[in-house]
Image: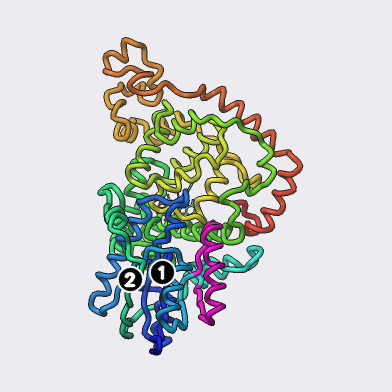
Amino acid sequence: MDKPPINIVWLKRDLRTQDHAPLQQAEQDGLPYLVIYLYEPTLIQYPDTSDRHLQFVYHSTQVMNTVWKSVQREVHLFYGDAIDVFGFFIEKYDLKKVFSHQETGTQITYDRDKAVAQLFKKYKIDWLESPTNGVVRGITNRDGWDKQWYATMYSKPIQNTYNLPEPELLGHDFLLPFSFLKRIKDYSDLYQPAGEVNGWKYLRSFTQRRGFNYHRFISKPTQSRSSCGRVSPFLTWGNLSIRQVYQYVKDHPNFRSNKRAFMGFLDRLKWHCHFIQKFEVECAYETHCINRGYELLERTLNEDFITAWKTGTTGFPLIDACMRCVIATGWINFRMRAMLVSFLCHHLFQDWRSGVYHLAQQFLDYEPGIHYPQFQMQAGTTGVNTIRMYNPTKQAQDHDPEGVYIRKWIPELRNIPQQYIHEPWKMTLLEQGFAGIEIGKDYPKPIIDLKKSGRIAREAIWGHRKNKVVQQEKQRILDTHTRRGQFS
Ligand SMILES: Cc1cc2nc3c(=O)[nH]c(=O)nc-3n(C[C@H](O)[C@H](O)[C@H](O)COP(=O)(O)OP(=O)(O)OC[C@H]3O[C@@H](n4cnc5c(N)ncnc54)[C@H](O)[C@@H]3O)c2cc1C
């Protein structure tokens, strides 16, 4: 019997129904097509991945299904590695074309894509990949990049329509195992709700009110939770395209009266693509110091330090509050992310690789193309950026002066008098008794001497900037990854 001819739309980090080039191309092609998402065991086991990512994806696809109800279309979920799932389609169907977005992922997803491309080539299947947001494939420097980015952002978003029927999905061996399904259906109330409908809600509330003080509160751990856009998970998993968000904010009636705040937000949408572009060109950001000269800076592994950092038990209240908060909710603001990395890599003087996957797992918005370059920037291993060492006590005094955030995330410190909230170790035993806490037992003593460790790190890291390899690498990085005159 003849195999039924079909096309496939392979969803990756583009879980939305509008402004979606692959879905538009599939409709225009005219052949019945299936829309699939693959839960790939090889990727799920990779240390950057955690259940919250898988859950966000699952709930995003369920929202797509709801939006698509009237057009009788759905996302079909598979549990299997791409090669095996596409093997099934090749065996049972006359698979003509596969449409997807280009993915700027880690080496493991890049290798997967190469293997899939080979399979498609063997069976003469066309794989049409569309650019993702403003990221450009195949460039070796940034000449003309900014201009192209704006051209993309100002072009008309795709208005997807759905007319073609879905072909029948034949029986297969890649159903989601029951226990896995249960695992990904679960969802903490403390995470942002997934899916494009929720993404639009966040965007609306940002422009209607939340974002008016965007620039004032961006560094505050408490206020930023409502004043920031909070669109990052929706962008990471493609519930919203950058172009949709850009145009929505730029064209909003409140833009003119909130220009400073909204422009600050729009600039960051460009940073989003700018960072992913770095990773697109050099995905070794995940595993190697991007400035190879920093591989020569020796650090002594201290497992106890790393465990204390990961579990929010370092004895420094703001560090611990941030870590506990991100574990519980999946989000902290930029400044606090930077501070956590700086503390690990500077004050604790640990290799950035000892913490990079831990935070990737916690961030609901984990985006490889932003995460690794940002992590290295904050760890001071690029050689081109100013090295920032955040003093966690000063950060706490500046950005959480009354300790509201600290008290919320470290219940042990709830009853500490105001004057000690940032330095509880300074309380006398008598004062500890009055506050009902014993420092060293109920809450840890600081695991390091901040002043001493800051001085040692500064000498080592600042001193290393003159290293010959660091200097050579610096020029290469500037030529490849930066826009002229800009060092980020
Ligand atoms: C160590 C470290 C790791 C990070 N890892 C990630 C990550 O995995 N995923 C991620 O989306 N962001 C990451 N960021 C950047 C930034 O912290 C988040 O984008 C931001 O906190 C998301 O919240 P928001 O949507 O409210 O941002 P807003 O301030 O409202 O900004 C709007 C959007 O602009 C983009 N953006 C904002 N700040 C940055 C930035 N500094 N660099 C690049 N893009 C930016 C994001 O897409 C964000 O959603 C990281 C920062 C650091 C220091």
Q: Residue at x 66, y 41 (%)?
A: 294
Q: Which residue is mark 1?
A: 11
The local crowd at label 2, few if under 14, some if 14 to 19, many if 20 or more residues have their Cα within 10 Å, is some
Instruction: Report the amino acid beneath label 2.
Output: Val
- Residue 251 in percent (x, y) is at 38, 68
Q: Which residue is mark 2?
A: 75
Query: Do the numbered discs 1 and 2 sit on residues whose CB atoms are within 8 Å?
Result: yes
Q: Residues within 10 Å of mark 1 (few under 14, many from 20)?
A: many
Residue 200, x across and y down, in percent:
31, 63
The vertical placement of 379 against 199, above or below, is: above
Find the residue positioned furthest to the left.
70
Residue 216 appears in the figure? no
The residue sitting at 56% across, 70% down in the picture is 148
Find numbered disc 2 in the image and state the secondary structure of the residue it sits on: strand
* Segment colored magenta: 102-130
- Residue 397: name its quadrant: top left
